[in-house]
Image (cartoon, rainbow, N blue to C red):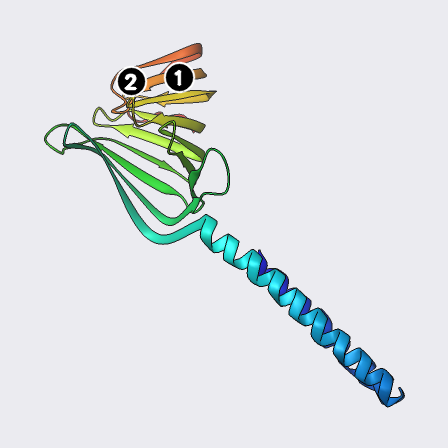
């Protein structure tokens, strides 16, 4: 935000340069000296403000690209999270890690075989609670060829569970289940829809759009 603000201010001031020069040439020399002193003082004050804001911003936010986060329990890797963009926001309570360009999480069994995969276009990881909030085109698939679609989901990495109160759709090889709210283990093999609204039987050639 600081960088954008500085660039915008520079562009605005450049547009006014011809008018300023025309006015300055008609002023007495003592007025020019006074204006020069004021401008220099003002610039120093503005720069110090920007520098302080920039320094504070750098201290409060850690950034990285192409990040992999490994989650383990009792010495065993339980999940790997992959994200293209990673920002650790520390000037709020609770602190969190923001993944604004999407994420992918692979969940493993004790022999490191993938049991389920979660993808979403946006995510936040709250370190204190262990909750990962994902939004926008959330998809979870498992080894049984079942798929969960929703717009918001919470993964608690400490409890190794998924939660949501939003609308969900689960597609299996034989049926599609619609409803509101869901609780599941992170391998997405044991799940419960809170309020089932409909079940549609399907065949391999008649999946719903």
Q: Residue at x 42, y 33 (%)?
A: 134
Q: Nearer the viewer, residue 119 or 23?
A: 23
Task: Check the picture and name the quadrant holding the C terminus.
Answer: top left
Q: Badge 1: few (under 14), some or many (20 or more) residues near its Cα, within 10 Å?
A: many
Q: Is residue 29 left or right of residue 135?
A: right
- Between circles 1 and 2, the one closer to the viewer is 1
Task: Check the picture and name the quadrant holding the N terminus.
Answer: bottom right
Q: Position of residue 201 (x, y in %)?
A: 35, 15
Asked whether residue 111 is in view, the answer is yes
Kind of element beneath mark 1: strand
Q: Residue placed farthest to the left in the image?
A: 111
Picture disc at residue 129: none
User: Residue 20, located in which quarter of the rendered image?
Assistant: bottom right
Kind of element beneath mark 2: loop
Q: Residue at x 47, y 48 (%)?
A: 60
Q: Residue at x 45, y 45 (%)?
A: 100
Task: Please give the residue where the numbered disc 1 appears in the rendered image.
Answer: 182
Q: Nearer the viewer, residue 148 or 28?
A: 28
Q: Nearer the viewer, residue 195 or 4?
A: 4
- Upstream in the sequence, badge 1 or badge 2? 2
Task: Please give the residue where the numbered disc 2 appears in the rendered image.
Answer: 174
User: Residue 26, located in which quarter of the rendered image?
Assistant: bottom right
Q: Badge 2: few (under 14), some or many (20 or more) residues near its Cα, within 10 Å?
A: few
Asked whether residue 122 is in view, the answer is no
Residue 190 to residue 154: above or below? above
Residue 162 to residue 3: above or below? above
Q: Position of residue 23 (x, y in %)?
A: 86, 83
Total of numbered circles in the picture? 2
Q: Nearer the viewer, residue 166 or 175?
A: 166
Query: Distance between the Cα atoms at labels 1 and 2?
Result: 20 Å
Q: Residue at x 12, y 28 (%)?
A: 110
Q: Position of residue 191 (x, y in %)?
A: 31, 15
């Amino acid at each position: 935000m600081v960088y954008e603000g500085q660039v915008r201010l520079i562009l605005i001031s450049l547009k006014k340069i011809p008018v300023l020069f025309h006015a300055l040439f008609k002023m007495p020399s003592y007025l020019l000296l006074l204006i020069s002193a004021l401008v220099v003082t003002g610039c120093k004050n503005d720069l110090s403000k920007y520098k302080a804001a920039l320094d504070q911003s750098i201290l409060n936010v850690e950034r990285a690209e192409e990040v992999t986060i490994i989650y383990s329990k009792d010495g065993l890797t339980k999940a790997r999270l992959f994200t293209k963009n990673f920002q650790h926001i520390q000037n709020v309570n609770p602190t969190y890690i923001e993944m604004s360009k999407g994420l992918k999480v692979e969940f493993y069994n004790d022999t490191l075989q993938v049991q389920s995969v979660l993808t979403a276009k946006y995510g936040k990881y709250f370190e204190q609670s262990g909750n990962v909030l994902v939004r926008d085109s959330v998809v979870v698939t498992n080894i049984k060829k079942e798929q969960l679609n929703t717009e918001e989901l919470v993964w608690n990495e400490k409890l190794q569970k998924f939660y949501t109160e939003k609308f969900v759709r689960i597609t299996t090889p034989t049926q599609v289940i619609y409803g509101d709210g869901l609780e599941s283990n992170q391998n997405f093999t044991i799940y419960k829809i809170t309020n089932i609204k409909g079940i549609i039987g399907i065949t391999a050639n008649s999946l719903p759009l």
